[in-house]
């Protein structure tokens, strides 16, 4: 016992120094990760592992599109809606790839699903392509939640050496762990196979000798690798450019929704066609943009005229 007090006195400076170091480290080290707001949001955006405090941020004002707002793609809408209902009921359902022409409603359709089924427990996590290498970390965060999550990847495309490409492929079916039962991936792309395809790759195809009328074709390794990712999506939905009549139908729908459909439809019709010609596209996006332009311009003209009249 006689040695205890001197030993304590000798340790005191060391303990004080250690406490001083710890206090300094508290100012340097990042704060503890912030728990996502699961109760007050239906949509989230993954910010990446480099964000120390908030990796999964709630989206305060998600788009308010409804499924009924999605026009002229009834087949695609019905198929993805049915797949989503299966998912919400705990039935087998597929990851979905929506591919095809720009502005034809691919991303709008996914956003409308969230508004349609949020009341049934559907939630959505938006992931940028550059963060797909972190997909296993997202899955670990979601797997114990009671909600059903769609991981939404918009405008998905890769280069051949992209790390996110291999991580996504492994997460969909190649990994031992795989997706949790409460997670699906819905992705949109202008490319069917998500990777650039070159004419030279077709030259690697090989013919298996046999009956001249029934030769087997074996794709080259490069083509096989590119197809392997898109094949992990169990449901493919293709989107083709709209015809003129479909484009005008969408224009008319949005003008009605904006309370801006004129008595003389032919005048609006002609302007809508000119608008599309100037943009080089008859897409649903262009139809929506024209309707907003027409509605805003019309209301502005009415207000201006009313102001002059009152003067």
Image (cartoon, rainbow, N blue to C red):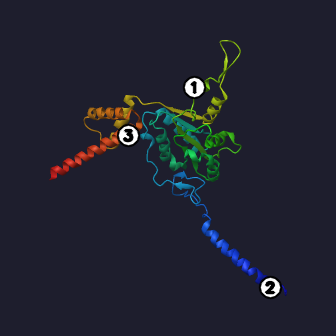
Helix, strand, or loop for circle 2? helix
- Disc 1 and disc 2 in contact, CB within 8 angstroms: no
Q: In the image, 56: left or right of 311?
A: right
Q: Earlier in the sequence, mark 3 or mark 2?
A: 2
Q: Looking at the image, which residue is at 33% across and 32% down?
A: 273
Q: Earlier in the sequence, mark 1 or mark 3?
A: 1
User: Is residue 133 at least partly visible in the picture?
Assistant: yes
Q: Mark 1: give few (<14), some (14-19) or many (20+) Cα within 10 Å.
A: few
Quadrant of the image for the N terminus? bottom right
Q: Which residue is mark 3?
A: 288
Q: CA distance from mark 1 to mark 3?
A: 36 Å
Label drawn at residue 6: 2
- Against 251, is 42 above or below? below
Q: Looking at the image, which residue is at 27% across and 38% down?
A: 262
- Against 168, is 1 above or below? below
The label nearer to you, 3 versus 2, is 2
Residue 148 % position (x, y):
58, 48
């Amino acid at each position: 016992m006689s040695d205890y007090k001197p030993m304590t006195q000798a340790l005191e400076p060391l303990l004080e120094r250690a406490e001083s170091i710890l206090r300094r480290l508290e100012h340097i080290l990042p704060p503890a990760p912030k728990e996502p707001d699961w109760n007050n949001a239906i949509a989230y955006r993954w910010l990446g592992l480099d964000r120390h405090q908030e990796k999964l941020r709630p989206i305060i004002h998600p788009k308010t599109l409804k499924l009924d707002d999605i026009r002229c793609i009834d087949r695609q809408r019905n198929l993805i809606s049915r797949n989503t209902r299966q998912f919400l009921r705990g039935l087998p359902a597929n990851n979905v790839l929506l591919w095809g022409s720009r502005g034809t409603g691919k991303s709008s359709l996914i956003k409308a699903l969230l508004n349609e089924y949020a009341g049934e427990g559907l939630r959505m996590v938006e992931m940028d392509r550059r963060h797909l290498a972190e997909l296993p970390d997202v899955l670990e965060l979601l797997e114990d939640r009671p909600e059903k999550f769609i991981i939404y990847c918009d405008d998905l495309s890769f280069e051949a050496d992209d790390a996110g490409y291999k991580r996504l492929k492994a997460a969909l079916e190649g990994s031992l762990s795989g997706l949790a039962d409460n997670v699906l991936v819905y992705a949109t792309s202008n490319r069917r196979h998500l990777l650039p395809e070159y004419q030279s790759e077709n030259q690697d195809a090989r013919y298996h000798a046999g009956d001249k009328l029934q030769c087997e074709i074996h794709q080259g390794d490069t083509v096989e690798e590119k197809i392997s990712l898109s094949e992990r999506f169990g449901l493919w939905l293709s989107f083709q450019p709209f015809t003129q009549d479909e484009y005008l139908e969408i224009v008319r729908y949005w003008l009605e929704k904006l309370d801006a459909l004129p008595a003389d439809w032919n005048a609006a019709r002609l302007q809508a066609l000119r608008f599309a010609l100037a943009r080089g596209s008859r897409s649903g996006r262009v139809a929506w943009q024209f309707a907003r332009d027409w509605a805003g311009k019309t209301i502005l003209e009415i207000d201006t005229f009313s102001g002059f009249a009152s003067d």
